[in-house]
Amino acid sequence: MVVTGLVIVADWLASQTEAITAVIPALSWRGTPEEVDEHWERARKVAPAFVANAQLGRARFGAERFEGMFPFPPNALQADLTEHLPVVVNGAGLLLVTAPTGDGKTEAALCGASVPGRAAQTRGMAFALPTMSTADAMYPRVEAFARDALVGDRALTLLHSMAWLSPVYSPAGPVGAEADSLGESSTDPVTATEAGAWLRGR
């Protein structure tokens, strides 16, 4: 399973237009054994940059306190969670938060995910929602959380079939209340989505 995934991701990365055009041989190329060896070496030299730009490494929960994850203090629900959850968590688990609308469940859930995330040494997180529109609406909030709470390869991907049409996910779209852009031109490359057009595809 791991080898299959590795081959598929390697194929996706190597099939990007920019990956191919970077190593196209000259018109005089005839495919002799020496030329094939040279082409192989040239491709090997540029490959690490494409892997690094895909940001497929490990994202970790860096912030440990609620105040380090969000630009506001916790409310009563969130404060109770941050006080009691770390005491009972020693690995992966399931946290269920039920509260009325407007009580800060989203931030409670994100902060709550960080506790077992650190304990289980997870490699990132997924935030699942029932519809494309709710996922689009939540994307800037999750992006802001990832920027403040996660360290390492914090590549953020909106995973639904119409993500390429979402204004918050397009290279020129807004991110939260800031004017940062997503994609290759992002001013925050650590949290940018740089895994290539194949992740933004239809």
Image (cartoon, grey):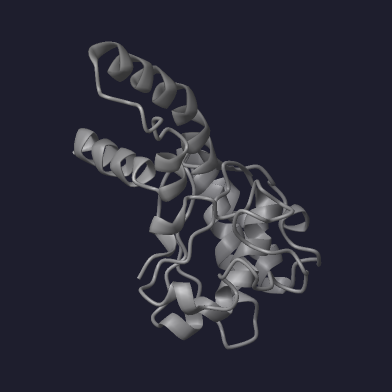
Position of 189 relative to 69 (above/below): above
**Residue at 44%, 30% in the rendered image:** 47
Q: Which of the two residues, 173 or 99, is positioned nearer the viewer here?
A: 173
Q: Residue furthest right?
A: 72
Residue 142 in the image: state x and y as whole percent: 60, 65
> What is the quadrant of residue 77 in the picture?
bottom right
Q: Is residue 61 above or below residue 77?
A: above
- Residue 19, how many percent across, how many down? 43, 41
* Point 57% across, 70% down: residue: 170
Q: Position of residue 43 (x, y in %)?
A: 40, 26
The residue sitting at the top extreme is 34
Report which quarter residue 185 is drawn in.
bottom right
Question: Furthest residue to the bottom?
Answer: 101
- Residue 106 in the image: state x and y as whole percent: 58, 72
The reply to whether residue 194 is visible in this rendering is yes
- Please give the name of the residue rendered at 55% of the width and 55% of the height, measured from the top-left corner: 193
Q: Considering the image in quadrants, where does the N terminus appear?
A: top left
Whether residue 94 can be seen here:
no
Horizontal relation, residue 76 to residue 107: left or right: right
Say above or below: 122 vs 71: above
The answer to which image quadrant residue 181 occupies is bottom right
